[in-house]
Structure formats: C-alpha cells, structure tokens
Image (cartoon, helix red, strand yellow):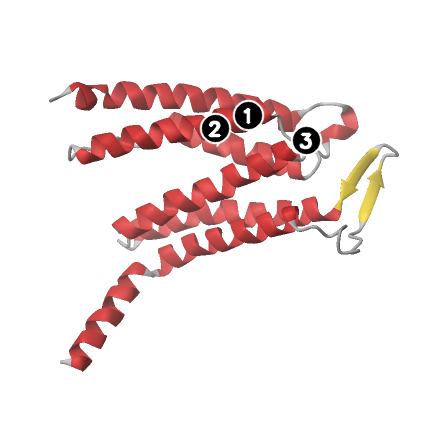
Amino acid sequence: MMISLRIKSATKLEVLMNKANKITMSRIILSIVIMIILLFPFDSLGIDLPSYIINGNIYVELKYIVAGVLFIIASLTDFFDGKIARKYNMVTEFGKMIDAISDKMLTNSLLVILACQGMVSPVIAVVFIVRDIIVDAIKMLVGNKGKAVAAIGIAKLKTATLMLGLVFSLFYNLPFELIGINVAGFLLIISAILSVVSGFKYFLMAKPYIDAK
C-alpha cells in the first residue's frame, strides 16, 4: 500500500512538473533574480557595480543590463513553454495557473520597480496593474459560472510590445537613444493603449455570462 501511494504521488508530481511547467517555473525563478538584482542595496553595503558613460551623456549601470539579458531569457520561456505544452499534449490546469502567475510576476514587478526608479512612467505601471486586476476578476467571475473567456490576439500583441518596451528601458533605449528617438517609451505607451483596449474587449466577451442569472 505504501509503495502504491508513493508511486501515485510520484506520478502526480511528474504530471505537475512536466517539461513545459519546468520552463514556466524557470520564468518565476528568473523574475525573482531580476527583482533581487534591481532592488538589492549594493551601495549601502559598499559594493560598487560597474557603470559606463556612452556617447558622453548616457550613464549606464551594469545591473540594468544584466537584468535586461535575464528578462529576454525569461520572455523567451513564455513562448517555449506554451508551444511545448501544446505540441506534446502537456497542457494542465496547474500549468495554466503558474503560466499566468509567472507572466504577471515578470512584467508587473518590473514595471513597478522601474517606475519607482524613474525609468518608466508610473502611469504606465498603474494602467497595467489595474487592467490586470479587472480582467482577472472578470475571468474568475466567468469561471465560477463554468465558462471561459478565450485569449484574444490584441492581448498577445500587448504582451509583445510590453516586453519589447521593457527590454529597451532596461537597455537605456539604446541604440535609439543615440539618435534621440524614445522607442522604449513609445512601445510602452502603445502597449498600455492595447492593454486598455484588450481589457474592454474581455469585458464585452464576458458580459453575456456576467448578465446571465
């Protein structure tokens, strides 16, 4: 009996932590590492991280570059985990849950940190967080009625522009900063607009279920 229980527990764990879910979990770990790098009080502990001056007027701190590289890697896992899960039939409810958590951890935590450090407009961070709260509440309400709101293309475009905007923000908008074009800011504004539009579309899609008694 004990051996049987152990086998069942091991099988359940293997299902939960399949290859796709392991990739998703790596995104959560990378998100935590990025947060530590950007929030750790290196100066207070007397640790001087390298910094550089580019073109005589662009001050670049190494920690943001390192965080940018890790963010790119983490963003790529968002593409591969879903693709692998669908290709090898590894889609699970646990996977869907941690995928949503990892996405919000990666982008929203970075938005808040960069907003607090003056690298991103606080308005952008507020728009995304409020939108996500509303959309998650809508999905939860619809889910309680046994229904589901499908993902829409504009939401995926929003995520792509957001991630690109954050990458350029971490890389000090280089190389476009050299010619005075704020690509990072432009991408984040476009992404915020798409965020609001997609949130409104989710509401319209869910409205029949919300109104139903």
Q: Residues within 10 Å of mark 2 (few under 14, many from 20)?
A: many
Which residue is rendered at x = 29% and y = 65% of the image? 13
Judging from the image, what secondary structure is the residue with disc 2 in? Answer: helix
Q: Residue at x 67, y 35 (%)?
A: 117
Work out how far the residue at label 3 is from the one at label 2, CA to CA, in angstroms: 17 Å
Above or below 103: residue 136: above
Quote the CA–CA distance across marks 1 and 3.
12 Å
Residue sitting at the far front:
44
Q: Looking at the picture, which amino acid does disc 3 mark?
A: Gly
- Residue under the image location 70 percent in, 48 percent down: 63
Q: Please, what is the three-letter code of the amino acid marked with disc 1?
A: Ile
Q: Quadrant of the C terminus?
A: top left
- In this orientation, which residue lies closer to the viewer: 27 or 87? 27
Q: How many numbered discs? A: 3
The residue labelled by disc 1 is 124
Residue at image mark 2 = 128
Residue 91 in sight here? no
2 and 1 marks in contact (CB < 8 Å):
yes
